[in-house]
Image (cartoon, rainbow, N blue to C red):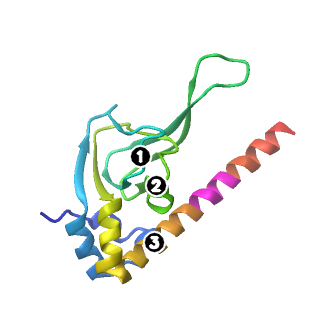
Amino acid sequence: MPVDLSVFKDAAPYRGLKEPDWKILAELLREIGREAGAAVFKENDPGDGFYWVRSGKIRISRQVTPEGRREKQEQLLTVLTAGQIFGEMALVDGEPRSADAVADSEAVLFFLSHSDYEKLKRENPATALRIQDMLVVTLCSRIREANRAFETIRFWCT
């Protein structure tokens, strides 16, 4: 059964996708629900695909041990909302998850598995290339955001 992707169509990162791409994705993506507090994945889990947030909030964080402490603490990286994607690094590099993803509120997600993406590359290479372009735009945006955060940290530490 096709999924409703309307929340994504007008968002900036997805503007390169064409109507046939959306139809293909609607057939490939699998809907997943998560209750508030439920894990989507944990750091070091296998990177088996990526997620699209249809509704709700997803908290992306890591458990770190601050200098001079023994107990781990949560390092919040971001909170994602409807229209955003996450877990895309695993699709690009095939490495394990680099952070935890937990539903901060009840959430509806769409999942594109690595195997479905590989199938998409074989059967619809133009759509796969546009998705890859969208992933690159998303990754670049996140790197720029991290750079700004480091600049702020450097400013406050000098």
Q: Return the residue at label 3.
A: 132
For disc 3, the neighbor class at 10 Å (few under 14, some 14 to 19, many from 20) is some
Residue 135 shows in the view: yes
Amino acid residing under circle 3: Gln
**Total numbered labels:** 3
Return the mark for residue 46: 1
Amino acid residing under circle 2: Ala
Q: Residue at x 37, y 44 (%)?
A: 57
Q: Nearer the viewer, mark 2 or mark 1?
A: 1
Query: CA separation, marks 2 and 1?
Result: 8 Å
Residue 42 x %, y %: 43, 37
Q: Residue at x 62, y 55 (%)?
A: 145
Amino acid residing under circle 1: Pro
Q: Residue at x 40, y 43 (%)?
A: 58
**Quarter the N terminus occupies:** bottom left
Identify the magenta region.
Answer: 141-147
> Contact (CB < 8 A) between labels 2 and 1?
yes
Of 22 and 124, nearer the camera is 124
Q: Nearer the viewer, mark 3 or mark 2?
A: 2
Q: Is residue 147 left or right of residue 56?
A: right
Q: Return the residue at label 2.
A: 90
Return the mark for residue 64: none
- Mark 2 residue element: helix
Of 115 and 151, nearer the camera is 115
Q: Residue at x 76, y 50 (%)?
A: 151
Q: Choose top left, top right, bottom left or bottom right for residue 2.
A: bottom left
> Contact (CB < 8 A) between labels 3 and 2?
no
Residue 53 x %, y %: 34, 53
Q: Is residue 97 above or below residue 30?
A: above
Q: Earlier in the sequence, mark 1 or mark 3?
A: 1
Of 118 and 6, nearer the camera is 118
